[in-house]
Amino acid sequence: MTTPDTQRPRPGSDILRTALRRNLGAMAWGTFLMGLYQAGETAFPIALGLIVEHALRDRSPGALGLSIASLAVIITTVSLSWRFGMRVLQKANTTEAHRWRVRVAECGLQPVARDIDLKSGEVLTIATEDADQTADIIEVVPLLISSLVAVLVAAVALGLADVRLGLLVIVGTVAILSTLSVLSRRIGAGTQEQQARVARAGAKVADLIIGLRPLHGFGGNHAAFRSYRKVSTEARQQAITVAKVNGVYAGTALALNAVLAAAVTLTAGWLAFDGQITIGELVMAVGLAQFIMEPLKLFSEMPKYVMIARASAERMALVLTAPPVTTSGPRQPTAGADLELDCVRHGSLRRLKLHVSAGEFVAIAAYQPRAAADLASVLAVNVPPHAYEGVVRVGGQELADLSIEAVREHLLVNPYDGEIFAGTLRTNIDPSGTSRSVPEAVEASMLTDVVALHREGLDHAVRDRGANLSGGQRQRLSLARALAADTDILVLHDPTTAVDAVTEQLIARNVAKLRRGRTTVVLTSSPALLDAADRVLVLDEGVITAEDTHRNLLAGDEAYCAAVAR
């Protein structure tokens, strides 16, 4: 069930507030333990100063033993509080990052696409790196508070020795943070731009991998590589810029912290030399000046991480706040319904009108491949109903009035380039594991020879994008998945372009047999599939120009014969 806070649009600041609110318990416990750790660290030089003070004054073995036992307690507290505090915070951090990854992935996998100008590679970067950096706020806040505790304990302890020492720590800390806050804003803006450029480079790589073979075919691979090199170089240059700012930030923080520590040490030495503080207090002050550098360093770095987390949250908000391309209607399609397009105008389609009765097997021969692609996009609801003229009806109901989730379950459009996923043959054919027609789908798609080649059968491993399968095997695997879904209306777009003529003939007959009694539309120029259909519609220049059986069209339509004869 989706919670209310994941339903409403959210800017980056709301995302950070949501992350903090969901982890208040873990952060409170982690803050307590990390504060205890920092207090113990700071207490160590204070204890040393007291030991020196009592050793010089009392010279008692009992007091020395008690002091050693106190040091042991402090060291144990420091060790255990750090161990368990970081465990609590890192567990909460990892869990929160997982939540945001799932949320971003959920947005990408919704039946209705979101109106956002980001490619899949960019969304992947947001779902991984940006989700992780946003979740870092869970650790940043407790560490910031615990570092503040250490600085305050040190300031109070030094103030008890001499007010000037305490004021020096407080004033110095404020000055350090004021100086570093300017640099942290630059880091946040630079990191956001860097993430955007890295995401664009990742998207370019994904595009290249998908289209590498066609690019090689017409010699466009070198131009594509140059394009990627340009995008990658921009990402590298931005990363170098951010690294430089980070270096300046770290160097400035270290230098300022060292200056403050030196100032405390010199001031304490002068006060001891003047007799205004004791030797034990001098030891404490020198020790605190050294120990305080760690919490000061941590304290001064936190604004940078806050800005990075906010920049990543703003990028996640690009996905999470993007409106859907279309709004689903409330109605459900009728089972076994017919399919109708009434004066649809989109892309290369020009007032297209066609009607497919329930249970009919219709083939559409598109003379222009672009028209077939546009028709498939409209039927797959990849194009929202308000983006084209005319009406698409399923079972007499307009597509705009139907629930998109229900439409996708009722009407399946299988693209010619269906994705193959890493897993097994079985999980690619039946991802949900609920289909009862996997054997029939395997046989109808002529995937039986692929299954028989391997000892594991349907459990044979498939690599990402089907890298260990041939083009024809990938196409048949995609067809088997579409047939196993067993939907009321099935639209196949060029399902046999990568198989040989004999296999194509067998697939055509098998599909017609398996789909008998259910509505099937095939966008194809394959003579085998055209011949297996109940009737053929000729799509030319965006409209239906002829309608008959494949053989009648061959006999009486020269243009049709020239377009489909092989």
Image (cartoon, grey):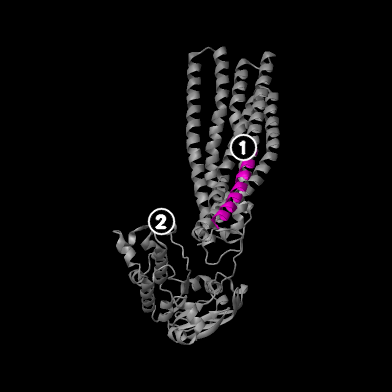
In this rendering, position of residue 256 left or right of residue 396: right
The residue singled out by tag 1 in the image is 301
- Magenta range: 220-244
Report if residue 474 is visible in the image. yes
* Residue at image point 48% right, 40% down: 87
Q: Quadrant of residue 442?
A: bottom left
Decide: few, some or many residues near mark 2? Use Cα within 10 Å; few <14, some 14-19, many ≥20.
Answer: some
Indicate the amino acid at tag 2.
Arg
Q: Nearer the viewer, residue 178 or 199?
A: 199
Residue found at the very far left of the displayed protein: 455
| Residue 231 magenta | yes
Whether 286 is drawn above or below 350: the answer is above
Percent position of residue 190, x then y = 65, 45
Q: Residue 104 at x, y = what percent? A: 54, 57
Q: Which residue is identified by label 2?
A: 463
Residue drawn where x is 58% and y is 63% of the image: 114
Q: Residue at x 62, y 48 (%)?
A: 234
Q: Residues within 10 Å of mark 1 (few under 14, many from 20)?
A: many
Whether residues under marks 1 and 2 lie with C-beta atoms below 8 angstroms apart, the answer is no
User: Would residue 430 be visible to someone looking at this image?
Assistant: no
Question: Is residue 551 rendered magenta in the image?
Answer: no
Q: List x then y, in percent, for residue 221.
A: 54, 56
Disc 1 vs disc 2: which is toward the camera? Answer: 2
| Closest to the observer, 449 or 30 | 449
Indicate whether 544 appears above or below 256: below
